[in-house]
Image: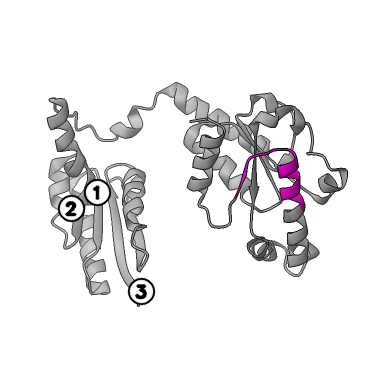
Amino acid sequence: MVIKRTAFFVSDGTGLTAEALGHSLLTQFEDVEFRLIRIPFVDDADKAHAAVIRINDTGERDGIRPILFTTLVNSKLAAIVHEADAFCLSFFETFLAPLENELGVKSSHTIGRSHGTTDSSDYKQRIEAINYTLAHDDGITDRDLEQADVVLVGVSRCGKTPTSLYLAMQFGLKAANFPLIPEDFDRGQLPGSLERHRGKLFGLTIQPERLAQIREERRPNSRYASLSNCRYEIGEAEKMMRRESIRWLDSSTKSIEEIAATVLQELKLS
């Protein structure tokens, strides 16, 4: 029997930090199905009380108290939110006080500090990386590949685009991606001018059954989505990647975060 629980992520900022940290803990419980709710920008008492009402109402409907993750810097607001009938985990209370003891200094307790430390040059780098990645998606062009940090290759719909965008948005990396298509297999060559950028290449593959399922949603009852065609394309793509000594991984059961971490490690980009 699958256990169902609601988890709240409450923050005085976007809530992304609370959600990322909380989600990493919740994924360790495979037999529990979590409904995730983010409550961002809780930066005054009224919003804090409103959050408590929402959390308590959810607990009453569920018949069991929610899980509550918070990253509230303001101790007064945190005290209000922690009055909710929920199992509360405060990341700042858990980690900030021990760090203060270890460092021998008090923290600034500044709201939004985790985002404010990112300087304008880093922000600009990410924007440039996103623009570059969008302009070099799905083999649109092979111009300016010398600027790319990584070039992903693989058959259509194996996860190249979301991985490229994640690398750009999260790490500020310029990521191009190129589909491997039957014409490339017939020629026995990599597409475009990729040969000159071999050191930046990383391949993605996928299980044929999973690929057929994904393509069927895009083009139902087409040859493109047929299992036989998916098996052919994947087989040829993997042959090419082995022949060209391109590092690659199977994305079938991998999250984008896992794929990106492998790319960073293999290409020594971290």
Disc 3 crowd, CA 10 A, few/some/many (<14, 14-19, 20+) = few
| Dot label at residue 70 | 1
Residue positioned 24% across, 62% down in the render:
55
Q: Amino acid at mark 1?
A: Thr
C-beta proximity under 8 Å, tags 3 and 2:
no
Which element type, helix, strand or loop, lies under badge 3?
loop
Q: Amino acid at mark 2?
A: Val
Q: Earlier in the sequence, mark 3 or mark 2?
A: 3
Q: Which residues are magenta?
A: 236-249
Q: Left of 160 or right of it: where is 31? A: left
Q: Choose between 135 and 3: the one closer to the eye.
A: 3
Residue positioned 32% across, 33% down in the render:
114
The mark lying in front, picked from 2 and 1, is 1
The mark lying in front, picked from 1 and 3, is 3
C-beta proximity under 8 Å, tags 2 and 1:
yes
Q: Earlier in the sequence, mark 1 or mark 3?
A: 3
Q: Earlier in the sequence, mark 2 or mark 1?
A: 1
Distance from Cα at disc 1 to Cα at disc 3 = 26 Å
Residue positioned 26% across, 73% down in the render:
61
Residue beneath label 3, please? Answer: 2
Q: Left of 208 or right of it: where is 67? A: left
Q: Quadrant of residue 101?
A: top left
Q: Choose between 262 and 151: the one closer to the eye.
A: 262
Instruction: Name above or below for residue 139 compared with residue 173.
Output: below
Q: Choose between 210 and 240: the one closer to the eye.
A: 240
